[in-house]
Image: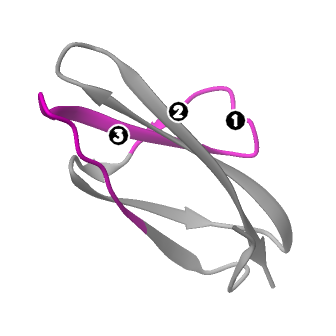
Amino acid sequence: ENQVVPAGRTTSILGFVKDSIGIERVEFRVDGEDRFRAAEGTSFWEARVRLTPGRHAIVVRAFDETGIASTVRFHLIAQ
């Protein structure tokens, strides 16, 4: 939460998700974008973003192989 990242440069957000059934896909969006974008990978995933200066809300959701989703929200500060 509120980690500082460089503004205007590509930043990698890395994560790990685990499920007893298996992870089908991971998606993310920035600041309430209309649609989610696919992250690279599943259990270990990466989302690349380029942020303008300021505080940004990041939402990541992971779907297991049965379609059940788990969602996390956090903020990054681009300077």
Q: Amino acid at mark 3?
A: Val
Check if residue 25 falls in the magenta segment. Answer: yes
Specify the farthest residue to the front.
Answer: 20
Sequence order check, earlier mark of 3 and 2: 3
What distance separates the C-alpha of mark 3 from that of mark 2? 9 Å
Residue at 42% over, 38% down = 27
Label 3: which residue? 26
Observer-nearest residue: 46 or 66?
66
**Which SS class for mark 3?**
strand
Observer-nearest residue: 34 or 24?
24
In the depicted structure, whether residue 4 falls above or below residue 21 = below
Mark 1 closeness class: few <14, some 14–19, many ≥20 residues within 10 Å:
few
Mark 2 closeness class: few <14, some 14–19, many ≥20 residues within 10 Å:
some
Q: What range of the chain is rendered magenta?
A: 14-38
**Which SS class for mark 2?**
loop
**Quarter assignment of residue 68:** top left
Asked whether disc 2 touches disc 1, contact meaning CB atoms under 8 Å apart, the reply is yes
Q: Amino acid at mark 2?
A: Phe
Asked whether disc 3 touches disc 2, contact meaning CB atoms under 8 Å apart, the reply is no
Observer-nearest residue: 25 or 71?
71
Label ID, residue 36:
2
Label 1: which residue? 33
* Left or right, 14 with reference to 8: left
In the depicted structure, whether residue 14 falls above or below residue 41 = below
